[in-house]
Amino acid sequence: MSTTPDLTTAVWRKSSYSNADQGTCVEVADGHPGIVPIRDSKQPHGPLLIFPAPAWSTFVAELKGDGIAMR
């Protein structure tokens, strides 16, 4: 039994923090409860990362400076 979610119909959106010249682009697929799929827009058929939603929220909060730094 596979635990990998089926992302064949995922709708990807480019991060608002991606580079304006299309050089560094992170894409996120919304609408997947409990997980946050991430990929490189330059390699849409390449590997992707799947984060548990709470871990992704903590990561983003740390990047924004809203969270408590983990040491």
Image (cartoon, rainbow, N blue to C red):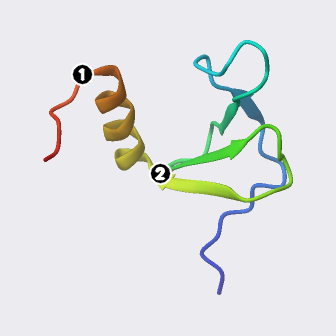
Residue 70 % position (x, y): 17, 44
Q: For residue 11, which quarter of the picture?
A: top right
* Left or right: where 37 falls relative to 52: right
Question: Does 47 sit above or below residue 67?
Answer: below
Q: What residue type is labelled 2?
A: Gly
Q: Nearer the viewer, residue 3 or 14?
A: 14
Disc 2: which residue: 34
First in residue order: circle 1 vs circle 2: 2
Q: Quadrant of residue 47?
A: bottom right
Residue 26 location, quadrant = top right
Q: Residue 5 carries which label?
A: none
Q: What residue type is labelled 1?
A: Asp
Taking the spot 24% from the left edge, 21% from the top edge, the residue there is 66
The relative height of residue 56 versus residue 26 in the rendered view (above or below) is below
Q: What element carries label 1?
A: loop
Which residue occupies 42% across, 43% down? 56
Could you tell me residue 5's position as x and y percent?
Answer: 66, 63
Disc 2: CA contacts within 10 A as few (<14), some (14-19) or many (>=20): few
Q: Which quadrant would the N terminus be assigned to in this image?
A: bottom right
Q: How crowded is mark 1: few (under 14 residues within 10 Å), some or many (20 or more)?
A: few
Please state which of residues 62 and 4 is positioned toward the viewer in this rendering: 62
Q: Mark 1 points at which residue?
A: 66
Q: Kindly identify the residue that appears in the image at 72 percent across and 42 percent down.
A: 40
Return the residue found at the far top.
Answer: 20
Question: What's the distance in space between the residues labelled 1 and 2, CA to CA?
Answer: 21 Å
State whether residue 68 is above or below residue 64.
Answer: below
Which of discs 1 and 2 lies nearer the camera? The answer is: 1
In the image, what residue occupies the spot 63% across and 45% down?
A: 38
